[in-house]
Image (spheres, grey):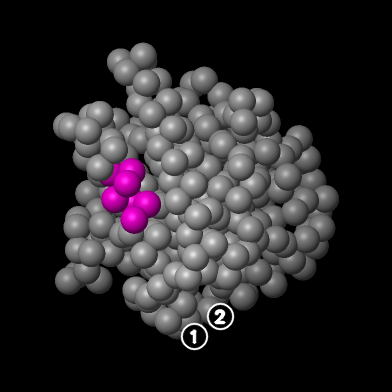
């Protein structure tokens, strides 16, 4: 199967590049912006076009494979991760960035078999950076190996995070409580690229020591989580313990000690899981 999954990853890279062309072309044209769960949860026709391009292309090559796609789930399809080969797709991670031409926009493609990540592809379209990882084979950017930072002191670290799309006062209070706690450790700084996938690639690249967020989705982090792991980093839930990509909570760090220190400062909460049907949320 190793060669088959390598072929699938090579195909994912090619599709991601093609999708990136669609994104760059769309930035030169007028775009129609719509909303999903709230006025700040944006979607464009390009999101939908890119997801259709990826899914249709993969179906032609791998007709028995399954899909979890951001826009498909938004349209009512189940977010169901089974043992079957599954492509987990975020057509434009950083849609708000895309709408504002803020230059961190990614196509993210994760691939899972038996609920285990086999490869991840994150293409930062406007930077023309292709991040890739195969399970047990390392992580790369444009073919060059990636390695997390060797910084051991959180006080000498940069931490990445985002504010998410929820504007519920209770969630916002907890987000800012966590931000204040971490900033006052003190750390060197807090940053955010506006894309979970790119933030995770920054951890894998050694540019930041850690990234945490509550409110992301499996399609935001499925590819990036493997890229972090294969670059030597660690993944953790925001309350410690094993990360569950359906839980919409994650800490990714260069080393366990820094992840554990961040966990101590997070004022955690639990958004509805990705695998919970909307009727039960």
Q: Identify the secondary structure beneath mark 1.
A: helix
Q: Nearer the viewer, residue 281 or 84?
A: 84
* Residues marked 1 and 2 touching at CB (< 8 Å): yes
Q: Quadrant of the C terminus?
A: bottom left
Q: Residue 53: where, in percent of width, then height?
A: 32, 46
**Would you say 39 lies left or right of 64 here?**
right
Identify the magenta region.
Answer: 49-55
In the image, is residue 74 above or below residue 169? above
Looking at the image, the residue that sits furthest to the bottom is: 169
Q: CA distance from mark 1 to mark 2?
A: 6 Å
**Would you say 113 lies left or right of 39 here?**
left
The residue located at (45%, 64%) in the rendering is: 215
The residue located at (44%, 41%) in the rendering is: 18
**Would you say 196 lies left or right of 31 here?**
right
Say few, some or many: other residues with alpha carbon within 10 Å of mark 2 (under 14 / 14 to 19 / 20 or more). Answer: few
Q: Nearer the viewer, residue 103 or 239?
A: 103
Q: Residue 205: where, in percent of width, then height?
A: 68, 38
Residue 69 in sight: yes
The magenta stretch spans residue 11: no
For mark 1, what is the residue?
169
For mark 2, what is the residue?
173
Q: Quadrant of residue 279?
A: bottom left
The residue located at (61%, 56%) in the rendering is: 104
In the image, is residue 49 above or below residue 182? above
- Count of numbered tags: 2
């Amino acid at each position: 199967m190793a060669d088959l999954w390598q072929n699938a990853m090579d195909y994912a890279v090619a599709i991601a590049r093609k999708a990136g062309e669609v994104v760059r072309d769309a930035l030169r044209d007028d775009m129609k912006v719509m909303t999903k769960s709230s006025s700040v949860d944006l979607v464009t026709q390009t999101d939908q076009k890119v997801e259709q391009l990826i899914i249709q292309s993969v179906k032609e090559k791998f007709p028995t494979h399954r899909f979890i796609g951001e826009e498909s789930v938004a349209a009512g399809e189940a977010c169901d991760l089974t043992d079957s080969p599954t492509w987990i797709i975020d057509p434009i991670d950083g849609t708000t960035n895309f709408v504002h031409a803020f230059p961190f926009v990614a196509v993210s493609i994760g691939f899972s078999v038996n609920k285990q990540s086999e490869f991840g592809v994150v293409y930062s379209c406007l930077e023309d950076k292709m991040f890739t990882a195969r399970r047990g084979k390392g992580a790369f950017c444009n073919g060059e190996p990636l390695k997390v930072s060797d910084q051991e002191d959180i006080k000498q670290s940069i931490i990445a995070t985002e504010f998410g799309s929820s504007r519920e006062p209770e969630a916002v209070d907890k987000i800012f409580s966590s931000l204040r706690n971490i900033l006052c450790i003190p750390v060197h700084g807090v940053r955010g690229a506006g894309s979970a996938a790119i933030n995770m690639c920054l951890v894998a690249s050694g540019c930041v020591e850690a990234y945490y967020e509550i409110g992301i989705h499996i399609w935001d982090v499925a590819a990036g989580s493997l890229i972090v792991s294969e670059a030597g980093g660690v993944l953790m839930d925001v309350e410690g313990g094993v990360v569950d990509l359906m839980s919409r909570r994650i800490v990714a760090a260069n080393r366990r000690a820094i992840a554990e220190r961040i966990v101590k400062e997070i004022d955690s909460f639990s958004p509805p899981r990705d695998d919970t049907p909307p009727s039960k949320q």
